[in-house]
């Protein structure tokens, strides 16, 4: 009887340890969302939407002038944002392109692109501010440009604290350097590791795939 009880006790302890290990390891529990990742998503989305709205506002008609000719015919001349502030539309598009590029780059590149987007947003906002009396669309352009500039500045200031993008900034397990064998290098690139990562040696980068 005592042997049977002693044999059952280790089984129960092992089962209890396994169950508690599964719970403590967190493999079965849902992972809490990272607030920094949510912040990154909100800022990038705000930048893209502001750039799109600014481009729309810059391409719309801002003023219209009716002129009556000698024959009594009336002609209406419409001036759009590209006529009154020719730089506004390219700047809005440049800011949007910068934010779209951030979706496929790491945090260091996002800082640079954020500065570009901030300057583009300020230039686009200036085009609207100079023609506030021309209607509603210049006001929309000015507001969108300021939001674009704010999102770009926020990105430049906060990108370093955002979580790394897995595909471009994830390091190999254990931080081990990738072998100089070109086959190992290209296999690592196929798995999504950054080719400019310091874990990939310079000599491996100089070699191409074996033919």
Image: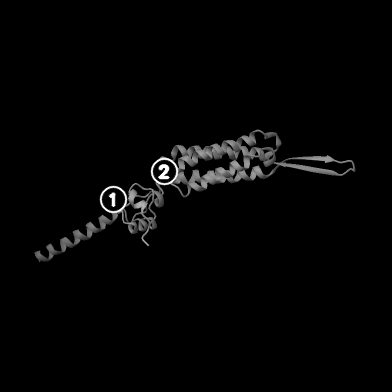
Residue 51 position, x and y percent, is: 57, 44
Of the two numbered discs 2 and 1 in the rendering, the one whose residue sits closer to the viewer: 1
Residue 9 position, x and y percent, is: 16, 61
Which residue is at the front of the view, 84 or 43?
Answer: 84
Residue plotted at (52% across, 44% down): 98
Of all residues, the one furthest to the right in this rendering is: 71
Q: Which mark is residue 162?
A: 2
173 to 64, vertically: above or below: below
Circle 2 packing at 10 Å, graded few (<14), some (14-19), many (20+), is some
Q: Which residue is mark 1?
A: 174
Residue plotted at (9% across, 65% down): 3
Q: Quick one: quadrant of the C terminus? A: bottom left
Mark 2 / mark 1, whichever is N-terminal: 2
Which residue is at the front of the view, 51 or 195?
Answer: 195
Which residue is at the front of the view, 201 or 57?
Answer: 201
**Could you say whether the residue bearing mark 1 is in a helix, strand or loop?**
helix
Of all residues, the one furthest to the left in this rendering is: 2
182 to 129, vertically: above or below: below
- Distance from disc 2 to disc 1, alpha carbons, whole Å, reads 22 Å
Task: Using residue 118 as the reference point, say whether residue 88 is left or right of it.
Answer: right
Residue 158 position, x and y percent, is: 44, 39
Task: Using residue 114 as the reference point, say whether residue 174 is left or right of it.
Answer: left
Q: Which mark is residue 82?
A: none
Task: Using residue 29 as the reference point, say whether residue 141 is left or right of it.
Answer: right
Question: Tags 2 and 1 in contact by the CB under 8 Å rule?
Answer: no
Residue plotted at (25% across, 55% down): 21
Circle 1 packing at 10 Å, graded few (<14), some (14-19), many (20+), is few
Q: Quick one: quadrant of the N terminus? A: bottom left
Residue 163: quarter of image: top left
Residue 185: quarter of image: bottom left
């Amino acid at each position: 009887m005592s042997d049977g009880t002693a044999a059952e006790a280790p089984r129960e302890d092992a089962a209890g340890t396994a169950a508690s290990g599964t719970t403590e390891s967190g493999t079965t529990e849902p992972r809490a969302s990272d607030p920094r990742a949510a912040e990154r998503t909100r800022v990038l989305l705000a930048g893209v939407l502001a750039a799109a709205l600014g481009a729309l506002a810059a391409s719309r008609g801002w003023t219209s002038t009716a002129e009556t000719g000698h024959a009594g015919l009336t002609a209406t001349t419409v001036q759009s944002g590209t006529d009154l502030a020719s730089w506004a539309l390219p700047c809005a598009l440049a800011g949007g392109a910068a934010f779209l590029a951030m979706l496929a780059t790491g945090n260091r590149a996002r800082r640079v692109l954020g500065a570009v987007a901030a300057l583009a947003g300020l230039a686009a906002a200036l085009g609207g501010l100079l023609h506030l009396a021309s209607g509603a669309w210049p006001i929309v352009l000015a507001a969108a440009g300021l939001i674009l500039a704010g999102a770009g500045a926020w990105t430049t200031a906060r990108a370093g604290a955002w979580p790394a993008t897995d595909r471009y900034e994830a390091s190999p397990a254990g931080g081990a350097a990738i072998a100089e064998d070109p086959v190992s290098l290209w296999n690592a690139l196929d798995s999504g590791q950054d080719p400019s990562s310091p874990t990939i040696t310079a000599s491996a980068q100089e070699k191409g795939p074996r033919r």
